[in-house]
Image (tube, rainbow, N blue to C red):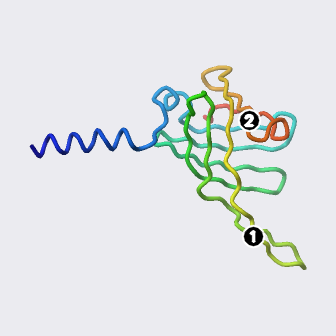
Amino acid sequence: MLRYFLGATLFCSLLISPAPPAQAANTLVGHWVGLVVGTRYTADLVIDNRGRYTELTKAGTLMTQRMGKWLILPNGLLRFTVTDWQPKQQCLPPSGCFPIRMPPGSAYQYRFTSPNAVLFTDVTFGKAAGTISYRRAP
């Protein structure tokens, strides 16, 4: 009876807990280095198989980091939900420091151009956000 209960509990927890689909986990999981097409904006993205991600972005001397969850939506879009970020404030002398609000999450259409290259097109912000070309990090 205890074995049945534990098995049923495990099965139900797997159904309830959000997890990326197996196919996406096999293809998107890993360390990616990206460049926004036509800019000097670079991104270092790590996607794990538990549905979490970390992204470090750089534009010149400015740098930001976002951490959170990722999920493939039923319509095939890749959704990033931000749960933490850095920096949390920006200091501008002589005015002082100002808080930086949590950045919004994003949704992307993604298309593999090879097993080690993928294009992310932002559908949340459209053309203003551009297309990010990622390649798998060595």
User: Horizontally, is 29 left or right of 117 in the view?
Assistant: left
Residue 30, image x, y percentages:
55, 37
Residue 91, image x, y percentages:
81, 72
What is the quadrant of the C terminus in the image?
top right
Residue 17, image x, y percentages:
41, 44
Residue 108: which quarter of the image? top right
Q: Rounded to the nearest whole Å, what is the CA distance between mark 2 and mark 1?
A: 27 Å
When the figure is inspected, residue 99 is found, relative to residue 126, above or below; the finding is below
Residue 72: which quarter of the image? top right
User: Horizontally, is 135 left or right of 83 in the view?
Assistant: right
The amino acid at mark 1 is Pro
In terms of secondary structure, where does tag 1 sit? strand
Residue 13, image x, y percentages:
33, 44
The amino acid at mark 2 is Val
Direction left: furthest residue: 1
What is the quadrant of the N terminus in the image?
top left
Direction top: furthest residue: 114
| Residue at left offset 68%, top offset 30% | 109
When the figure is inspected, residue 112 is found, relative to residue 125, above or below; the finding is above
Q: Which of these two is toward me, 30 or 108?
A: 108
Residue indicated by mark 2: 123
